[in-house]
Amino acid sequence: MRSGPSLRRSSFILGAALTLLMGWAAPVSAEPPYIATCGTVRAFNEPTPTAAGSVTIGTTTFSLHSGDRLPSTTPLGAPMCINRTVTTSGPVLTLLAMPSPICGEVLGIAAGIPDQRGPLIDIVTTTPDLRIALPVSASLGFVFPGRSTVACFEVGLDANGNAFAARVMGATVTVPATTPAPVTRLPSTATDASPTALAALVVTAWAAALFVIARRRDGSNGA
């Protein structure tokens, strides 16, 4: 009886194809984006190769290590932002001058938390490349539309040295050139299909092929 080896070979090929396609279709894990903190540097202790240092920006303190990127002169009293940069040897913290004004794409406004904090504007800045969540001033009378917005904000510093968005200096609305049409049919070609759709099609095709092979083998053996 030869149907066993043939089915085993076909099953092996099916398993290999599925492993490849499902691995390709699986989402890639990624850590959340780093949100920079900006404000006045109220305390600074430079790290050494044998001891960690620290920097306090506004009311938040960060631990520093000798591999972090720090200014050549003391940043004490200056408006700065602390951000994380990924290098070949791993992530490091970078302390750099706070841009003023802060311009970039507004990703949204996070609602305030009673007795903890007010609302925050989430901005991806243009220069330098930072993602910042700035507290919103109560006098900021600007309503963002429900689509991509590029805006510039005047930045203020509160009594504790924390940066906040004081007012909007200008804004533009970016409207997508085309709106993707809803999916109403199966892909007509392989290039149109998503990895998940391709995996489903392969499963169906191979299952049908294995069924036909098994029926033919059973028929020939019975004969």
Image: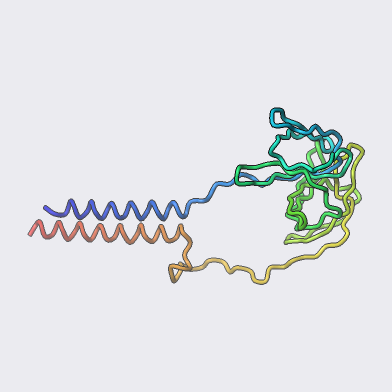
Residue 51 in the image: state x and y as whole percent: 71, 28
Please state the total of marks drawn on the protein image. Answer: 0
- Residue nearest the viewer, comparing 166 with 60: 60
Residue 102, given in percent of the width and then of the height, sits at 83, 54
Q: Is residue 120 above or below residue 66?
A: below
Furthest residue to the left? 223
* Residue 196 locus on image (x, y percent): 46, 57
The image shows residue 16 at horizontal and vertical percentages of 34, 52
Name the residue: 90% across, 44% down: 157
Which residue is at the front of the view, 41 or 111? 41
| Image quadrant where residue 182 sits | bottom right
Q: Is residue 141 left or right of residue 112?
A: right
Q: Nearer the viewer, residue 50 or 221?
A: 50
Relative side of 158 to 81, left or right: right
* Residue at 68% in and 41% down: 92
Residue shown at 81%/59% (left/top)?
Answer: 151
Colour scheme shown = rainbow
Q: Is residue 12 left or right of residue 132?
A: left
The C terminus: image quadrant: bottom left
Left or right of 22 on screen, residue 71: right
Q: Residue at x 73, y 31 (%)?
A: 48
